[in-house]
Image (cartoon, rainbow, N blue to C red):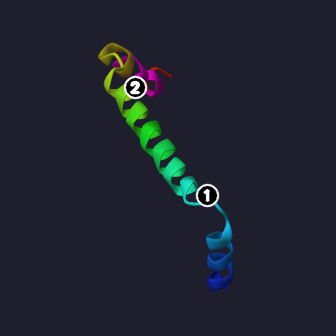
Amino acid sequence: MFEAIKHNMETIVGVAIYPIISLLIFFFFFVGLGIWVYGYKKEAIDDMSQIPLND
C-alpha cells in the first residue's frame, strides 16, 4: 500500500518542499509560543492561578 503512495509522491515535481514547510511552521510556532510564555507577566500568571480558588 505504501509503495503506491511512495511512487506517486516521487513523481510529483517539487514535492520535497512540503515537509520543509511543515517543519518550519512547527518550529516557528513553538518558538513563538515559548517566547510568549516566557515574556508573560508573573503577576498575570499568579492572578490566573488563583481563579479556581476564588469561587
Which amino acid type corresponds to the residue marked 2 in the rendered image?
Trp
Q: In the rendered image, which quarter is residue 33 located in?
A: top left
Total marks shown come to 2
Labelled disc at residue 36: 2
Task: Name the residue tied to disc 1.
Answer: 14
Q: Quadrant of the N terminus?
A: bottom right
Which amino acid type corresponds to the residue marked 1 in the rendered image?
Gly
Q: Nearer the viewer, mark 2 or mark 1?
A: 1
Q: In the rendered image, which quarter is residue 28 located in?
A: top left
Q: Which residue is depicted at the point 61% across and 72% down? A: 10
Task: Name the magenta segment's main secondary structure.
Answer: helix
Q: Which residue is depicted at the point 65% across and 62% down? A: 13
Q: In the rendered image, which quarter is residue 7 located in?
A: bottom right
What residue span does the magenta drawing correspond to?
A: 46-52
Alpha carbon separation for disc pair 2 and 1: 34 Å
Looking at the image, which is closer to me, 20 or 29?
20
Residue 42 locus on image (x, y percent): 30, 18
Q: Is residue 29 above or below residue 41?
A: below
